[in-house]
Every structure is written in structure tokens, then in C-alpha cells.
Amino acid sequence: MFDFDSTPLSLDEPAEHWDEPVKRNHLERRASAIQRLKLEHGERNIDAVIQNTRDLGPKGMSLVTYHNAMHRQARSAFVVGAYYPALVATCALGERILNHLILDLRDSFKSSPHYRKVYNKDSFDKWPRSVEMLTDWNVLLPEAAENFLILETLRHRSVHFNPETYATMREDALLALTLLGKIISRQFGYFGGQPWFIEDTPGAQFIKTEYENHPFVRIYLIPASGFVGVNYGMEFLGSGWVHLDYADYGDGSLSDEEFAKAERERDPAKVVTRAMIEAQDTKMKGT
């Protein structure tokens, strides 16, 4: 479900104080990353491609897939030096994400005073109004709302005629992509301390009970999530990772805090594996 690119992290030169084995491993990863960039973008302007990739930084993870391909395309345009296409595409994608949020969620807020303004429209191009609406619906996180409004200023400056754009295309494109990356990672990511996730569960994220019926969580996050208990396991298949778990944990329930504690302190021997499931199936067939 998610999309992540850590290539930029491999492109820095090794630090002088690193141990020789660490330097050697890093240089090998760097050479491999540069080779991938050459295969993808060609060798003609490889130094600029490397610098642009480094400046972009890693592409953040997102639980929502519809924007990932377009985000990747805008980043690729920047990497090869197509700065104006990257700038305009990034601004357009920001507007598309706002539209998706409103169109996907508006029917969950029919009692809102905003609803009568949006219930019969197919698209929205007034960013401040959209941001205000999604903020009032407790959908858009404050950091994402702030970055949307900054991105909107870049949209107006780049889409509408402005002679200064010629001199600031790379700078503006990089800022726009940085802002969009922050928006996506914060609003749709799962390692940024989002309020709908239970705290203190290192390496995994679980949805808080109080947020299970929140429209944003119900429509975007729950369909991309598994329903598991504290002893769930993970297995990688050809199509991706799948959850392995007990069919029944018995009666009773845990609070979010109790679940987090139980998940952190779980007995590794009780974590579900494929072998355990197959053994259970064999046992059931024999009874």
C-alpha cells in the first residue's frame, strides 16, 4: 500500500570520522544508488541528477495510494531538471488532494454549515476555504493546513504570470515538493505522531478506539489496516506483507494503553507464525 524512496539517504559522501568498514559499506550503497539513477535518468547530466535527488530528500511513506504515482512523477521531473513542470505538477497535486478530501468526506458532515456549500459541487479551487472546512471538520492536521496555505502562494505565483518565476523555478519547485512531502507524510503517514494512532508502540501503529469512527480514519486508514491482536505476526508474500493472527483471543477487551503495554511486552514465543497456523489447522482437521 505504501510508497517510499530512501535513495537520497545513500548519496551523501561518507563522513571522515566513520570507521573504514562503515565507509566502505556506504560507498558501495552510494555506487549502487548512482547506478540506479543512471539507468532511470541516463548519464548525460548525472551530476545534476545526483544533486537534485539529494536536495529532494527521501520520499515519505503514505497509507493512501492515489497520490503516490503523481507525487513520484513530480519528483522525477525535478530530478531531471524539469523544474517548471515539477512546480506546476506539485501545486496541482496539492489541489487534487484537497478536492479528494472534501469529496470523499463531505457526506459524513451533512450537519456542518459548510455542507450546503459543497454538497453539489464536483471540484474546489479556493484553497483557504477548503483548508478552513477540513480544519473545522477536524480532518486536516494543523501542520498540513499551514503547509497547504504556503503551497497555495507558490501555486498563484507560478501558474499566473509572474516574471520572477524564470529566476526562481528550481528554488520554487524544491520548496513546493518539500511542502507537499510534509503534507503527505503528516496527513497520510504513520510514523509522525498522528493523533489517531496509539502512543508508544515502537515499530507499528494502531488506531485509537476513539478514532475508529472518525470519517478520515474510517474512509482512508481502516481499509488500509489489519485487524489484529497483540500477538499478531507478519509474513511477506509475493504481493506484499500480510498479517498472521489467532482467530480468537477469548473474552474481554483492552484499553488503548493496556494494548500498547501488552504489545510492547509480548512474549516472542507467542507471536503468530505460519508454522503455528498450519499446526493449528492440522490439529483441527484431526479432531
Image: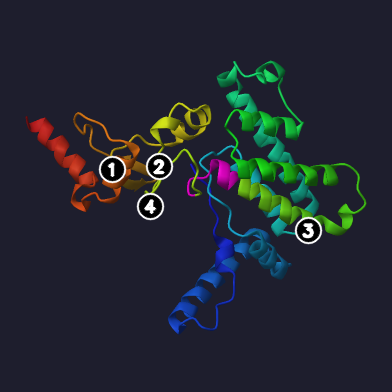
Q: Judge by depth and name the residue closer to the eye, 45 or 148.
A: 148
Asked whether residue 69 is in view, the answer is no
Q: Residues within 10 Å of mark 4 (few under 14, many from 20)?
A: few
267 vs 99: above or below: below
| Residue 202, numbered label | 4
Q: Which residues are magenta?
A: 184-191
Residue at numbered disc 3? 170
Q: Residues within 10 Å of mark 2 (few under 14, many from 20)?
A: some
Q: Judge by depth and name the residue closer to the eye, 4 or 194.
A: 194
| Residue 232, numbered label | 1
Q: Earlier in the sequence, mark 3 or mark 1?
A: 3
Asked whether residue 181 is in view, the answer is yes
Disc 3, SS: helix
Residue 52 picture location, percent across and down: 69, 63
Structural distance between the alpha carbons of marks 3 and 2: 39 Å
Q: Is residue 153 left or right of residue 250?
A: right
Q: Earlier in the sequence, mark 3 or mark 4?
A: 3
206 vs 76: above or below: above
Residue at numbered disc 2? 198
Q: Amino acid at mark 3?
A: Arg
Residue that appears at 32% across and 44% down: 260
